[in-house]
Amino acid sequence: MNLPAALKLFTVALALSSAVAQVHPPADAIGIPADRGPAAVWQSLKQLHTRASLIMITAHPDDEDGGALVWASRGLGARVALLTLNRGEGGANVMSSDFFDALGLVRTEELLAAGRYYGADQYFTRMIDYGFSKTLDESLGKWGHENVLREVVRVVRLTRPLVITSVFVGGPSDGHGNHQTAGLMAKEVFEAAADPNRFPEQIREGLRPWQAAKQYARVPFFGPEKESLAANVEVPEGTYDPLLGFTYAQLAREGLGYQKSQNGGTGIPPAGPRSSPYHRFASKIASSEKEKSFFDGIDTSLEGIASLGGGAAFLRDGLRAINADVEQAIARFDARRPEEIAGPLAEGAKKTARLIGEVESSLLSADQKYGILFELNEKKRQFNQALVRALGVSLRATVRPEQPVNPLMEMFQGEPDTFRAAIPGQTFRVHVDARAQSSSEVKLEKIEVSNTDGKPWVVESLPGSDFRVRVAPDAALTRPYFSRPDIEQPYYATEGKRYQNLPLAPYPLEAWADFAYRGISLRAGQVVQTVQHVNGYGEVLEPLTVAPAISIAVSPQAGIVPLGAKSFRVTAVIHSNVKGTAQGVVRLELPGGWSSTPASAPFTTARDGEDRNVQFQVSPAHLARREYRINAVARYAGKEYREGYRTTGYPGLRPYFLYSPSTYRTTGVDVKMAPGLKAAYVMGSGDEVPAALEHLGVQVAMLGPAELASGDLNRFDVIVAGVRAYAVREDLKTYNSRLLDYVKNGGVVIVQYNTPEFDHNYGPYPYSMTEDPEEVTDEDSKMEILAPENPVFQWPNAVTAADFAGWVEERGSKFMKSWDARYSALLSTHDLHQAPQKGGLLYARYGRGVWIYNAYAFYRQLPEGVPGAYRTFANLISLPKNPRR
């Protein structure tokens, strides 16, 4: 390679490495206790005193060994990264009705909340959790072996860890195909990331090959590998840290408690010894059988960085001088007066900056410079953070109303409420409070507010640390940088590599304050926050977002139309982010020959955040058994809007936004319903089945605790219990006997998929689910109708195996293992190498009524408009009026 080309590649590499090292300010307005005060200062000193680094590779959010991450990051001061292959889109959700990609955003935010405690930088691949995967071959078949490895290699080359770990070993003991893939990738990336011939496009992008020193995986809890894999390292997660006030395991579990969607949240374990065994699978250095740490035998001192430069004398001398300043700060540290160590930290920061300049101008090779500067720039960032913490630098940036704020009211009530989402072209005020609380030597030099999307925002400085901000007319919306066309695609697409492998794109507006201290410049930043006072939560600060002036969606997004229907309803949902009154028109784009009443309709919203529903009665022409699409289009202020967003999450979790086209997908289906049916629903953790039943002409009454306790249940023909209802509805457990009496008197109860909390004989006769119920994950698995003469398959629709074609995500979850002979098993299916599962649809006569347990995933199929699922569910809820019952 000629010199100009080499210099150009080196410049690109440096820019990429710098972009990785430069972390945007945290999205949280206030850090967790471990990252404030003397505890945070001590953490910074640990980080400055080592070059130890580690990456942990897992499959889904909540797979991580948080205790090991905390031990490495907060115990040893190591630079720690967590790479999660997917975002958990196919998992369960006990906290909200978010599923699929919406659930992926929920679990991303949960893992980010947990990661504050782990002290880890986070990365993701583009792979998607397509549902429970039983084998490694299935996962690799869905994702593609090279596709996964390519992204894992990229993240390892980005982060350049000395140690690679995983909680999975890549074998059957991992218990899940996605888990096995994570374990396999952790093994393969050890060699692949170091090979310049693997994924050379990354080298052209500016990355450099990287060889980690060692690779480990946690010894499995059970399975064939448990006994054969020796524990080379026992990670002491139960170690108590007096400045943190917790053991590493306790702090990790406090973070894990933010991951609630899978199980509702966890508790903090008691103090005491606790360790996690890890097996060493590979090492490039001499390693003993028993080690005290992942980093045994690796020179993790600051001087160890010199090894990347062939031991150059100027580099080793410079690092030794920097280390002396760090050790002086450590020796002088006093939790009562952390500012006392700012002097030696400032000297270390100066020397680090000088050494960076010396390396850049040296005769070292481009590869050597890349590696050394990567590490030194990280130290430069850590010195800045240590000084900001030691000097008590505080920065708070919030949106402010235009009208003056009463200081007395603010003192007692906090800052005034603001809007949550800005819109393109909007002008508003931002207030920044920046100060150093521990030393008069610190001088505030500059405050600035800047946008992150590269668009032409206008920021004007005002008196009193205020800024007037005008959002660019073409500002980027706050949305995922990744998307997919449908839920069957097992990976996301991204536009470019700007945010590739990051959890989310940065929030749109940041505030920065520059301080001068003893000849160096310090920088503190914060994402600009909005303010709301919420009953039960008090003052809630959330990052400012950018959203469209008008969001338009259809509700629901998919469904069916019975072939005999003369018309059906489509609801357009308009959400306004306009700060004041908004008036516009909404219409539907229909298939040829179709019409709607009205043809178009005006809408008016009075204020920011207001929703308006506009209903259209659509008359189809020549309806056939095929899919149709209807687009809702809103026009406001001369612009058309064709997409909308939903806010994902639940109270207490930072929300995020999932965008989708304002398109209604519907299919003509030969489906019939019992006439005049009166149905009730006991909502569990959240699903969209009641809304889907409206396509069948069924209006569902929702049953709350009062109705279950004392209401007249006999006025309903059928009562359906929602997904995981027995896990989240204590009233349902308490008054379950009333449901059984209702069945005895002639009613029909259908209990949808439930978790092992249901394994307490809530049905009319005994059954057993076990603690680890079976799943059937192949949505195309062969279906066998065991009792074709049963009324469920006879009326009003003749249901056959063909009605189970075209299902999505999975067949079902939490199949019964055994049951009383008075239950009839109606269906059987199974995955490859799995015994036939007959406990997915159990039918029992009880008194004059019928009780049904259903493990099949209708709650996923109906919102997606799967025709056969509608036909089958129509038969289930029509049972009360079935003449053959």
Image (cartoon, rainbow, N blue to C red):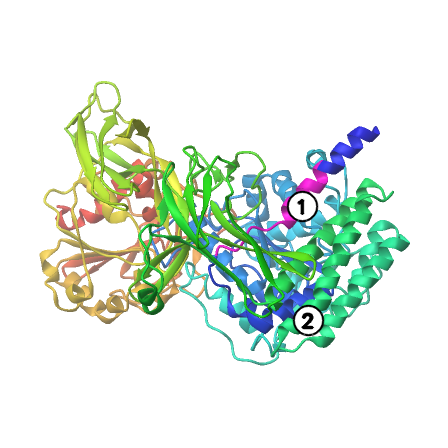
Residue 328 relative to residue 101: left or right: right
Label disc, if present, on residue 18 of the rendered structure: 1
Residue furthest toward the front? 463
Residue 757 relative to residue 208: left or right: left
Marks 1 and 2, how far apart at CA: 27 Å
Magenta-span inclusion, residue 13: yes
Magenta-span inclusion, residue 842: no
- Judge by depth and name the residue closer to the eye, 321 or 800: 321
> Hey, what amino acid is under mark 1?
Ser
Res 134 visible? yes
- Judge by depth and name the residue closer to the eye, 286 or 139: 286
- Judge by depth and name the residue closer to the eye, 798 or 747: 747
The spot of residue 439 in percent (x, y) is 60, 69
- What secondary structure is marked by label 2? helix
Specify few, some or many for label 1: CA neighbours under 10 Å numbering under 14, 14-19, or 20 or more: some
The spot of residue 397 in percent (x, y) is 45, 55
Task: Identify the magenta region.
Answer: 12-27
Dominant secondary structure (helix, strand or loop) of the stretch shown in magenta: helix
Residue 600 lies, with reference to residue 105, above or below; the image says: above
Asked if the residue at tag 2 contacts the one at tag 1, i.e. Cβ–Cβ closer than 8 Å, the answer is: no
Quarter assignment of residue 475: top left
Residue 406 relative to residue 791: left or right: right
> Hey, what amino acid is under mark 2?
Ile
Label disc, if present, on residue 68 of the rendered structure: none
Residue under circle 2? 341
Quarter assignment of residue 301: bottom right
The residue sitting at 39% across, 64% down in the picture is 756
Q: Pick whichever of labels 1 and 2 is earlier in the sequence.
A: 1
The spot of residue 16 in percent (x, y) is 67, 41
Image quadrant containing the N terminus: top right
The residue sitting at 55% across, 44% down in the picture is 138
